[in-house]
Amino acid sequence: MDGTRTALGAVGIWSMELRGASRPEVREAAAELDERGYRALWIPGLDGRGALDDLGHLLDAAPHAGVVLGVLSMWGQQPEALGDRLAALDSAYGPRTLLGFGVSNPDSAAHAGQDYGNPIASMAHLLDQLDTAAHPVPADRRLLGALGPKMVDLAAARTAGWHPFLVTPEYVAGQRARVGGGPLIAPHLAVVLDADPARARAAARAGVGMFIGFPAYWANLARLGYSKEDLIPGGSDRLIDALVAWGDLDDVARRIRAHLDAGADHVALHVLRPDGGGALPLPQWRELAALLPTFAPGAGGR
């Protein structure tokens, strides 16, 4: 997977705001991120509608960057159509796309008219179908949204690697020691560029706090040693401080470095605006771009 590692670089941008990429302001933002040296743009799958269209718009606007779908719920997906679409994107823009898949939850499966069943077996079946599609989605062009050891093992065996959400460097170190150096580990890291603790934690809770109570994240954080006192709605201060990089550029750089030193290959930065707004966080993306040379190959950190 060395080619994927090299293409993504050490630091990328993960953004809900880059969805709806047909809008001129989003295309302009993607072009600027590309010009500033970001080599990976990540977008969430959300409900899946329009996600593959967004990939095309971003690939067109950011000709030097890879674009990663991180991640799309597996339920209701048509493997043949996914293979056809990836082949078309490759033909138009070169092989710069990674497709990430997650099992989501039983409600998502039911909404798609499917049986959740055993999530590992269900995901393995989707990977089987992607392997045998008329235009296969190769293992090195797909990721899983994994947390627990069984899904991580599936990701390590049958994809480029995995994209964990709401994790600490300790999680990365433990999984890297367990699976070895082969699979790509690309954690999501929420970022608030604000040195005021109260404001930064409030922005963090507004942006990612809701997810802490979701069963998969709750269970993973409990495995990492966080107690019920930490796993309250919105998370304790201790938990928020462990999951979210807040402060100035130096503070964020230290948090990125902690993940890379623990064994991550790439860190996808999810900027949360201190004001809680949903507009494109261009000022923060511009500020963070100053860190890219720090994590470039040969800069002493990789």
Image: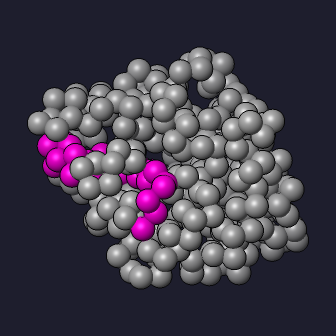
Q: Which image quarter holds the C terminus?
A: top right
Q: Which residues are magenta?
A: 61-89
Residue 20 image offset from top left, x and y in percent: 38, 73
Can residue 82 be found in the magenta stretch?
yes
Residue 202 image offset from top left, x and y in percent: 74, 71
**Residue 173, image quadrant:** top right
The answer to whether residue 25 is above or below residue 53 is below
Q: How many numbered discs, if any?
A: 0
Most foreground residue, 63 or 57: 63
Left or right, residue 233 beside residue 293: left
Residue visible at 59% across and 53% down in the picture: 12
Most foreground residue, 36 or 179: 36
Can residue 186 be found in the magenta stretch?
no
Left or right, residue 288 beside residue 23: right
Residue 259 image offset from top left, x and y in percent: 72, 39
Residue visible at 81% across and 74% down in the picture: 199
